[in-house]
Image (spheres, rainbow, N blue to C red):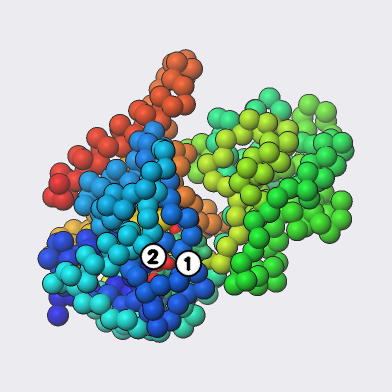
Amino acid sequence: AKEVIVIGGGLAGSEAAWQLARRGVRVRLFEMRPRKLTPAHRTGKLGELVCSNSLRSKEITSAVGLLKEEMRRLNSLIMEAALASEVKAGKALAVDRELFADHITRKLEGHPLITIERREITEIPREGLVIVATGPLTSEALAEDLKRFTGEDYFHFYDAIAPIVYAESINWDKVFKADRYGKGEGSYVNCPLSEEEYRRFVKELLAAEKVPLKEFEKPRYFEGCLPIEVMAERGEDTLRFGPMKPVGLIDPRTGKEPYAVVQLRPENRDGTLYNLVGFQTKLKYPEQERVFRMIPGLEKAEFARYGSIHRNTFVCAPKVLKPTLQLRAEARIFLAGQITGVEGYVESTAMGLIAGINAARIIHGKALVVPPPETGHGALIRYLMEADPHHFQPMNINWGLFPPLDLPRRERKRFPKRERYRLMAERALTRFYEWLGEIGEA
Ligand code: FAD
């Protein structure tokens, strides 16, 4: 039978099912709710939002605004539902979560090509085309089974996300490039702290407001990947002997090792993003800005991703996925949603959309497609493919993931940030429309 099995009726699974059905493909959608709930879901509705009711910025000069515009262009069901259930929230697209999920549920239940079965799937079907979209709280049995296709090492149950800052917002006069003991190519950027700066930093870190852990998130702490503030609680010098240790790092301006160091690691090949190494944290976002801007060189840091730690099921995408979102190990199986290694409602939905389109193309005997990196969808997929597999952590969309604009150096000053983002968004949409034409999806 020419049908596709979609496991998980959350954001990505609902979108994937819709994209398949729109293309005339029969879908069997499995959702375990309401019989079995995840620790975060409350209802049996398809496309339930588990937390905030905001799909973030509507502005095209924001990367997530651009991504939503691309999705709208592909007749996204999630976008349709969001616009139909929108509540006023300034520049953000916020929704009435009940109306939102009702809209999605009604559309999928009413579609003649979609059959919905309410039960937990504990094993990936051993044949046929399958899209796994079971999300950050994938049920245990299915996670165990999926691990067999990805390998133990490339399947994760928790994330430990360190903040990422834009390279252009670093004060390069205060930092120095060096690898420990001069080994390597000097790709790490080091922010040196004096004793006084270090003590003040630790004090503020300890006093900062944290996001409380949910009950089902607690086990994280037993896995040896502690939040920076929890490490700091163990003693004033713990960080200086841990992630902030200065050994082997000579500041060329003083010829000495600083008292402590925060290391930044390049996050992408374009060198537009830097990761604060070892700084996974549960600090509230505004507190991250306040406290981490105390680090010399980061006084004006702009954050592309904030740090966080969640219970989160995801794979090491650069190792296990193809850019079409198929598993390398078995091409008839697609992953979609947060499990692919993206983070966020919109990003997860976008990965459902691409998986849905590609699975439909297999049924129709068409070549599979990968969106170009200048587009929002393409930038996310490029991250999944090109991120360093040794340090892979989920990512939300941000402008640092896009190829930089080709502006002559002396002209850059003439383009303030907002103007550059507008140019990047225009480039993205032009390229996106061209691409839809090229692949016959316009
Ligand atoms: P989901 O929307 O979770 O969908 C997965 C579906 O699969 C669920 O309906 C689940 O019941 C079902 N399922 C799981 N296992 C099985 C199985 N074995 N058989 C059948 N069905 C199964 N992102 C934001 O942008 N903003 C937020 O505020 C936000 N808050 C979050 C809060 C929490 C507690 C969590 C865990 C995540 C949050 N996220 C947030 C991150 C993420 O964007 C959302 O979780 C998003 O819903 C992910 O979409 P998805 O389709 O991948 O997974």
Image quarter where the N terminus lies is bottom left
Q: Quadrant of residue 293?
A: top right
Closer-to-camera residue (212/249) = 212
Closer-to-camera residue (389/378) = 378
Name the residue rendered at 37%, 48% in the picture: 87
In this rendering, the answer to whether 394 lies above or below 153 is: above
User: Where is residue 225 shown, x and y percent of the image?
Assistant: 68, 63
Task: Judge from the rendering whether residue 298 lies leftward or rightward of residue 47; answer left or right.
Answer: right
What kind of element bears circle 1? loop
Task: Judge from the rendering whether residue 388 lies leftward or rightward of residue 382; answer left or right.
Answer: right
User: Where is residue 136 shown, x and y percent of the image?
Assistant: 47, 67
Task: Name the N-terminal-most of marks 1 and 2.
Answer: 2
Task: Judge from the rendering whether residue 353 lies leftward or rightward of residue 317; answer left or right.
Answer: left
Tag 1: residue type?
Answer: Pro
Tag 2: residue type?
Answer: Glu
Name the residue rendered at 41%, 38% in the picture: 91
In this rendering, the answer to whether 377 lies above or below 270 is: below
User: In the rendering, which numbered label is found on residue 136?
Assistant: 1
What kind of element bears circle 2? loop
Residue under pointer 2: 48
Q: Is mark 1 within 8 Å of ligand 1?
A: yes
Around disc 1, counting alpha carbons within 10 Å, would you say few (fewer than 14), some (14 to 19), or many (20 or more)? Answer: many
User: Where is residue 362 shown, x and y percent of the image?
Assistant: 19, 66
In this rendering, the answer to whether 119 lies above or below 329 is: below
